[in-house]
Amino acid sequence: MRLRPSRPVRGAGSGRGSVEHSRLTPRDLVSEAVAGMLQRPARSALTALGTVLGVGTFVAVLGLTATTSSQIDSRFNPLTATEVTVEDVAHDLNPFAGRTFPADADDRVQGLNGVEHAGVLWDVRLGPETAVRSSPVGTVGGERIGVVAASPGAVEASAPHVVQGRLYDRYLADRAEPVAVIGSGVAARLGITTLETGPAVFIGDQPFTVVGIIDDSLRRPEFALSVLVPSTTAERVWGPPGAGERMLVSTRMGAARQIADEVPTALRPDHPEYLKSVPPPDPRTLRRSVTSDLNQLFLLLAGICLVIGAVGIANTTLVAVLERTGEIGLRRALGAKGRHITLQFLTESGALGVIGGLVGASLGAVTVVVVAVVREWTPVLDAATVAAAPLMGLLTGLLAGVYPSWRAARIQPAEALRR
Amino acid sequence: MRRRRRTPTDASAPDGLPEPPVIEFRGAGLTYPGPPAVAAFKPADLALRRGEFVTVVGPSGSGKSTFLNIVGLLDRPTEGTYLLDGIDTGRLSDNGRTALRGRRIGFVFQSFHLLPHRSSVENVALAMLYSAVPARERRARAREALDRVGLAHRAQALPSRLSGGERQRVAVARALVGRPSLLLCDEPTGNLDTANSEVVMELLAELHLAGLTILVITHDPAIAERGSRTLTIRDGVLSDRSPAAAATGQAIR
C-alpha cells in the first residue's frame, strides 16, 4: 500500500473560515441524469413508452390530417367545381306526386345565367331477358351493358370525348328517333369498329342507329361502358323514368353554388322541395369536417396516451427515488443541496420525456409516410408538429417529475444514510 | 444570508496564532422534542485537534448516531455550539451547512454507500461533483486517491466486482479526495470480516500518520483501541477516558 506522508491532508483551501457554497454545473447535472437513466435501460425504455405512444399518435394524427386535406385539395379540381346534380326526392315527400322534372326541364335550366349545359338522365331498367346486342339474334356474354336515357343537354354536360361520329342533337331527340351514342367499351364488346357501315345496336328487339362513339366522359366516366339514348326515345320505348330521374348541370366557374340554389325553383316553382340539388363540395368545409370529426377523437386518444405516459414516468421516478434513498443520502453528505437532488430527478424524468417524444415523433412520421405510400398519397407533415413533439415529451416528463423530485429533496440525509 | 458565510469572530485566528480545533463542542447537546422529550445526546464539551485519531465507542442505542449526525452536520444541536474548523455551524443556513459538510468532512459509512452502476473511479470522483471541480480534474484526483488507498488497479471495476475491504477502501478514497478537515467514519468495519477490517484500520492508521484528522465511531472495543484517543459514549453522555488525551490532547499511539 503506497502512501505519501510528505503531504498532510489539511483543511480545504486557504479560506479556513469561509465555505464556498455547493454548485452543480448544468453539464454535470445532465451527465448525472443520463447515468441515472442508463442504470436501468430496460425500465427507462418501458417508462418512455407511454410518451412514445402519446407523441406518436399526436404526430401521426396531425400528419394524416394534413395529408388527407391536401389529397382533398387535389381531388377538388375545376371539373367537380362546375358540376351540379339535381336529384328527385318528390317520392319521399309525396308518393302521389307525378313526374317531378317538367318536360321542358332542359330549357328551363339552360336559361339560367351561368349554366353551360343541362339535361335530364336516368338509367333505363331493362328486364332480365332484355340484352344489348349488335344484331337481332347474337348474344353478348358476361355482364350486362347499361342503358342510360340522357337528353342532349345531359350528354353535353357530362363532357364526353367523341371518337367517331357525333352526339345526337335536339332535332333527333325531339323526334324521339331511335339513335344511340355508345361508349368505346361497348363498341369494342359489340364489335363495332366503324360507323361508316351504319351499325345498329339492339336493345331487346329495338334497333338503335349508332350515331357516335365516345371513349371517355370526364364527369360520367361510366358512360364509356354505357349505351346512351335520347331521353325522349327512351320514354317512348320504355315509358316514363320513375324515381331515378335526375339532372346533370355544368356551369361556368364559380357559378355552381348559385345555380344549385336556383335550379329547384326554376324547375318546380310550385314544389321546389321536390328537388334536391347537390352543389360541388366546398373545399374549406370539407377540410374542416375532416379535421373535426375523427381527428378530434384521435387527438383525445393521443392526450390520454400522454397522460398515461406522464403517470408512468411519475411512478417509475417515484420508485427510483425510494430505491435510491441511500444514494440521495450520500449525495447530500457529499455536499448536494436539496435543490441539486430535485434538479437531478427532474432532469432524469424530463430526459425520459424528451426521448419518448423523439422516438414518438419518428414513429408518427413513419406512420404518416407508410399510410401515404400505401394509399398513393403525397405525405404532408407540418414541420411545427414534428418540432413540437420532443417539446411535448419534455413537458410531460417534467410535469411527471415534479412530485417525485420534490419527495427526493425532502429525504433527510441522516435517515437515508442509516440504510 | 451573507452573514452566515462569514467567519465567526472568535475562531478566525490570524496567522501565527494557534489553529482552532477541527471539532469543538461547547456544551453542544441534542434533545428530541417530545413528548416525551428525549435527550439523545447530553450537552458536552469536546475539542478535536488537527491530526488526532479519535475513536468513539459505545453500545448501540447509546447516542453514537446522534453524535455522528451532529459532527457530520446532518443534525443541528438543540443546545450549545458546535464549531467545525472554527466555524460556528449554528449560524449557518442549511445551504451553508451542506457546503461545509461537502467540503470539510469526508464520510465513511458501514454500508459503503457506493453507487452500484459506477466504477470505482467514478464513485470517488462523485465526491467533488458539487464543488464545481472540472470533470477532467475530478477524474485525475480520483485516480490519485485510489492510488493512495492502493486500488489504482481497480479503478474501472464496479463495486459488485470488489471485495468488502476493497469497497470500503474505495469509500475511504472518496472521503479523502476532497481534502477534508475530518474523516468521519461510522462503523467502518461493521460489514467486514476480520482480515478486511484489519486492512481498513491499517489504512486509517496510515492516513493518520500522514496527518489526517480521523474520527471513528464504533461499538467494537477492539477497533476503539486503534485510536490515539478513545471517547466513550453511554446513555447519551460523552466521556473522555484516554489518559493521554487528558494530558496533552495530542495523544499519539
Image (cartoon, grey):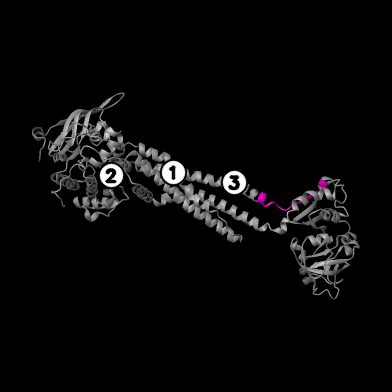
Q: Nearer the viewer, mark 3 or mark 1?
A: 1
Residue lying at the far bottom of the rendered structure:
A197
Magenta-highlighted residues: A272-286
**Amino acid residing under circle 1:** Leu
CA neighbours of label 1 inside 10 A, class few (<14), some (14 to 19), many (20+): many
Q: Which mark is residue A362?
A: none
Left of A16 or right of it: where is A376? Answer: right
Compare residues A70 and A313 and report the one nearer the observer: A70
**Amino acid residing under circle 2:** Ser
Q: Which mark is residue B131?
A: 2
Under circle 3, the secondary element is: helix
Marks 1 & 2, CB-CB < 8 Å contact: no
Q: Which chain does the residue under circle 3 lie in?
A: A
Compare residues A285 and B178 and report the one nearer the observer: A285
Q: Which chain does the residue under circle 2 lie in?
A: B
Q: Nearer the viewer, mark 1 or mark 2?
A: 2
Q: Which mark is residue A398?
A: 1
Residue beneath the point at 79% across and 60% down: A157
